[in-house]
Image (cartoon, grey):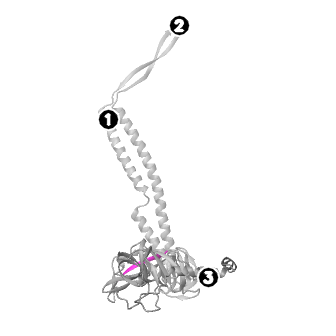
Amino acid sequence: MHLIDFFSRNKKTALVLGLILVLAAVYVVVVPRGGAAAGSTYQTEAAGRGNLSTSVGATGTVRATQSVSLAWQTSGIVGSVHAQLGDTVQADELLAVLERSSLPQDVVLAESNLISAQQALDDLIGSADTDKANAAIALRDAQEAYDEALHYRELLDQRVDYDILVGFNGTKTPMGWMRIPDIRHIKYYPDETQKAEADQDLALRIAELEDARRAYDRLQSGPNAQDLAAAEARVAAAQAALDQAKIIAPFDGVITDMSVQQGDRVSAGELAFRVEDLSHLLIDLEVSEVDINSVSVGQEVTVNFDAIQGKDYQGLVVEVAGAGTSSAGSVNFRVTVKLADADELVKPGMTAAVLIRVRNLEDALLVPNRAVRVLNGQRFVYVLGEDGLPNPVEVRLGATSDVYSQLVGGDLQEGDLIVLNPPETLDP
């Protein structure tokens, strides 16, 4: 049978052989000659370039962006419950309320106090609107009076010429006798007494106009600020007293815990609901002082949970503490991470393992960490020679990850076959 016919008829066998050839390209297995023990083999990897991401690892606990435990502010019997565990609620939404008949007297009286305080506030605002309208009318009248006084005073500084009818004269015309009006031209000069009186009147009109303008401007901003603040404070106090009988959501969130049912008798300080904002989840980490200078806001992170197998989550560093805390002889710094793709599987209180990607290198010459040996404080790797024997080569390493390190110096060259499993008895 020809080889071509064999592969065309045995496609599965050909696939397996191809896979074996691919795997053989990954590791070069060499049987050493000479100094190595007979039958021993070396796994190698060519020194090559690639991208390297260095990380700082830490563990922490998931928490909500906002979280609050809501407790009753007074005693009574629960009259109605408007939310259940797991419900999404809005800010200022009523969650539960006590029966009015079961409330202490001061809370019951708060209802009437609220009505009175609100009416007083409305009256204050309403009267301010009326005063503003009256002030506008007064300002208009004062302006008109001033304009008239000013015009009259200006006339007194001028000679007044006018004609006056003093009678009629008889005159003979071709058509007969006719009466002709006798009109005389008069020149009038005001005296100083009139001017002085006009000056006094003008000064009065100016003062009245200024008073009207100040009154109008003062009312433009609404009621007196102090009166308004006092009225609003009385309304707020009455409302706060009345709200002691209610549980109200302080922000948008989800009810993650509740311990209240209709008909329960409760006391002041007794917990009713826990509301958490789960729209964004945070993880608080404790990072060692050795690593903290590598961590900064904006760095990307990878998150894993023991409770969620086979899934990685992503996030960002959003806060790095400026001061550390000492515990058990070590100093740690709080770092806060925000999850970017949290789903319903992630819950507050879960323990998270976080890798902070503190540095990303591209096209770096990489050395496998498993191949690095240390002798007398010096790092080196074994490179497979042409004779099939491993030879020690000094290396200087930079950034490192779990698998690879960056080569920053030494005698290793790109393409050298690095021995991954040199015998322990070899010496440099």
Compared to residue 258, the image places residue 218 above or below, namely above
The answer to whether residue 223 is magenta is: no
Please state which amino acid type lies under the numbered disc 2.
Pro
The picture places residue 31, in percent across and down from the top left corner, at 47, 87
Bounds of the magenta span? 332-339
Image quarter (top left, top right, bottom left or bottom right) of the N terminus: bottom right
**Residue 105 visible:** no
The residue under label 1 is: 195
Secondary structure mostly taken by the magenta-highlighted segment of the chain: strand
The picture places residue 21, in percent across and down from the top left corner, at 56, 80
Q: Nearer the viewer, residue 256 or 221?
A: 256
Please state which amino acid type lies under the numbered disc 3.
Val
Circle 1 — which element?
helix
Please state which amino acid type lies under the numbered disc 1.
Lys
The label on residue 16 is 3
Give me the C-alpha separation between circle 2 and circle 1.
51 Å
Question: In percent of the image, x 41 and y 42: which residue is there?
Answer: 145
- Estimate how packed mark 2 is, as few (under 14), some (14 to 19) or many (20 or more) residues with alpha carbons within 10 Å: few
User: Which comes sooner in the sequence, label 3 or label 2?
Assistant: 3
Circle 2 — which element?
loop
